[in-house]
C-alpha cells in the first residue's frame, strides 16, 4: 500500500512539473504585448525587453500581422544598429526619440538564406534614438506614418 501511495504522489508531482513546463513553453517565454500609437495608427506591439529578445526581434518568423509590431525601449538615447539576421520578410524600422518619429527605414529587406552574420547590412537611425518600432514593410507609406508623428504607449 505504501508503494502505491509513493507511485501516486510521484505521478502527481511529475504531472505538475509537465503542466508547468508546458505553460512556460507556450506562455512564459512570450513577449509582453502593448498597444502603441504612431500618428493616428494603433499597433499591437510585442515588447522586446531582454537583450536576447532585442537581439532576436522578429527573426525566424514568416510574417507580421498588419496591426502587429515589435517595440524596443532602450531607456537612453544612442545610435542603435539593427540587423536582419534570421528575418524572412521585409520591415519598416521607425526610429523614435522623445516620443517623436525622427526617421523611417523603409522596406529593410530580409537577407538571402545563408548570408553570413558578418555580411549582414546594419541599419542605423539618422540620430540618437531611445525607442524603435518595427512594422511590416510598406505600412509606413500605406498608413501615412511620417517624420514628426507622435509616438505613444496606450497601455
Image (cartoon, helix red, strand yellow):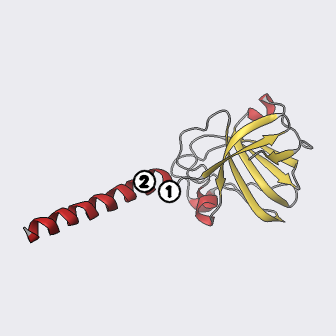
Residue 108 showing in the rendered view = no
Quarter-of-image position of residue 20 = bottom left
The percent position of residue 32, horizontal first and vertical second, equals: 61, 52
Cβ atoms at labels 2 and 1 below 8 Å apart: yes
The percent position of residue 96, horizontal first and vertical second, equals: 83, 52
- Alpha-carbon neighbours of circle 2 within 10 Å: few (<14), some, or many (≥20)? few
The percent position of residue 65, horizontal first and vertical second, equals: 62, 35
**Residue holding disc 2:** 23
The percent position of residue 103, horizontal first and vertical second, equals: 85, 48
Of helix, strand and loop, which one carries label 2? helix
Disc number for residue 58: none
141 shown above or below 151: above
Disc number for residue 28: 1
Seen at 79% across and 34% down, the residue is 41
35 shown above or below 32: above
Given residues 141 and 122, the one toward you in this image is 141
Seen at 79% across and 41% down, the residue is 37
Given residues 32 and 99, the one toward you in this image is 32
Inter-mark Cα distance, 2 to 1: 7 Å
Amino acid at each position: 500500500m505504501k508503494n502505491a501511495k509513493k507511485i501516486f504522489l510521484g505521478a502527481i508531482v511529475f504531472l505538475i512539473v509537465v503542466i508547468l513546463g508546458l505553460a512556460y513553453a507556450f506562455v512564459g517565454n512570450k513577449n509582453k504585448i502593448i498597444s502603441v500609437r504612431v500618428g493616428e495608427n494603433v499597433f499591437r506591439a510585442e515588447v522586446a525587453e531582454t537583450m536576447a529578445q532585442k537581439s532576436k526581434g522578429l527573426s525566424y518568423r514568416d510574417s507580421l500581422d498588419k496591426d502587429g509590431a515589435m517595440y524596443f525601449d532602450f531607456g537612453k538615447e544612442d545610435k542603435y544598429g539593427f540587423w536582419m539576421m534570421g528575418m524572412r520578410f521585409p520591415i519598416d524600422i521607425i526610429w523614435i526619440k522623445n516620443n517623436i518619429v525622427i526617421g523611417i527605414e523603409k522596406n529593410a529587406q530580409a537577407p538571402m538564406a545563408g548570408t553570413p552574420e558578418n555580411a549582414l547590412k546594419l541599419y542605423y537611425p539618422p540620430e540618437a534614438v531611445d525607442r524603435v518600432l518595427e512594422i511590416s514593410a510598406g505600412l509606413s507609406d500605406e498608413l501615412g506614418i511620417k517624420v514628426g508623428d507622435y509616438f505613444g504607449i496606450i497601455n
